[in-house]
Amino acid sequence: MRLLVAEDDPKLLKTLLRLFELNNYAADGVTNGTDAYDYALSGEYDGLVLDIMMPGLDGLEVIRRLREYGITTPTLFLSARTEVYQRIEGLDAGADDYLPKPFSTAELLARVRAMLRRRDNFTPDMLEFAGVSLNSATFELGYRNASRSLSGKEYQVMQMLMQSPGAVITTEHFITHIWGWDTSVDTSVVWVHISNIRKKIEALGAPICIRFIRSAGYVLEAIDDL
C-alpha cells in the first residue's frame, strides 16, 4: 500500500512517514497543499493523509479539486480543528474520515486500515494466481504446503505483479509506485528484488514465472501458459 502524507510541520511529517514505513506502508511526504494536489493527481496512491491547515492550498481545497478532477483516492484528514462543524466541512469536501490532533498512533493506524478497506480497488488479504498465494498479513508467498517469506519491498513488487497477471509492468512504474517520484533508486534495485523473488518461486516449485520483456518490463505468467 502506498500513502501520500501532507503535513506542514516537518517534525510531525518525519514522524508520520517513519510510523507508516515501520508498519509496512510505502509513504511519500509533502509540506504544502500545492504539492499534495500535484502528487495525488498521479493516481499512484492507495490513500491520502492530509492536514487541513497548509500553505498553498489547504487540505479542503486539495480534496475538492481532486474530487472534481475525478480522483477518488480515499482520504483521511488530520487537523487541530476539532469543532463538529469543521469535521462536517471536511467530510462534505470529499474526505472519508477525520482524525483530530493530538491522536494516538494506534488509532491513526486503525483509521488508515479502515480507510483502505473501503477503497474501490481494495486488495484482499490473500492474492492468488495459478495456485500460488500472496499473504498480506504475513508477507509470505505460498504454494501447496510450503511458503517463503518476502521482504517488504519484495512483497510490494509481487503484489503489483499478482494484481495484474499477464500485464506488463515497467521498471519505472515499480519505482514510482514503491519508492516514490523523487527517489534516487535506479533500475538495478528492481532487478535485484525480482531476482530474489524468482529464487523463492523456484524454491517453492511454483508454476509461475516473472518474465522480462526487453524494452517493455516484467510480466507474471503461469508456466502452463508459456
Image (spheres, helix red, strand yellow):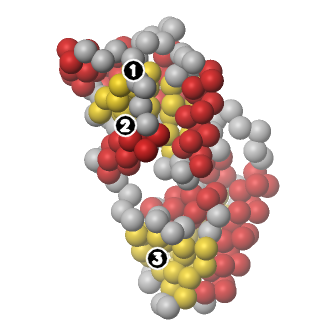
Query: In the image, what residue occupies the spot 51% across and 62% down?
Result: 159
User: Dots 3 and 1: beta carbons under 8 Å?
Assistant: no
User: On the picture, is 10 further left or further right than 4?
Assistant: right
What kind of residue is marked 3?
Ser
**Residue at image mark 3:** 133
Q: Position of residue 106 (x, y in %)?
A: 43, 44
How far apart marks 3 and 2 lie (CA) works out to 26 Å
User: On the picture, is 19 further left or further right than 72?
Assistant: right
Which quadrant of the figure contains the C terminus? Answer: bottom right
Q: Which mark is residue 8?
A: none
Q: Give the number of marks.
A: 3
How far apart marks 1 and 2 lie (CA) works out to 19 Å
Answer with the quarter of the image where residue 155 lies: bottom right
What kind of residue is marked 1?
Ser
Q: Position of residue 168 (x, y in %)?
A: 56, 59
**Residue at image mark 1:** 79
| Callout 1: SS | strand
* Whether residue 121 is visible: no
Disc nearest the viewer among 1 and 2 = 1
Q: Position of residue 29 (x, y in %)?
A: 58, 30
Query: In the image, what residue occupies the spot 50% across and 91% down?
Result: 145
Nearer-N-terminus badge (3/2): 2
* Whether residue 200 is visible: yes
| Callout 3: SS | strand
How far apart marks 3 and 1 lie (CA) works out to 39 Å
**Residue at image mark 2:** 73
Query: In the image, what residue occupies the spot 43% across and 26% down?
Result: 102
| Callout 2: SS | loop
User: Dots 3 and 2: beta carbons under 8 Å?
Assistant: no
Number of other residues with Cα within 10 Å of mark 1, as a class: few under 14, some 14 to 19, many 20 or more: many
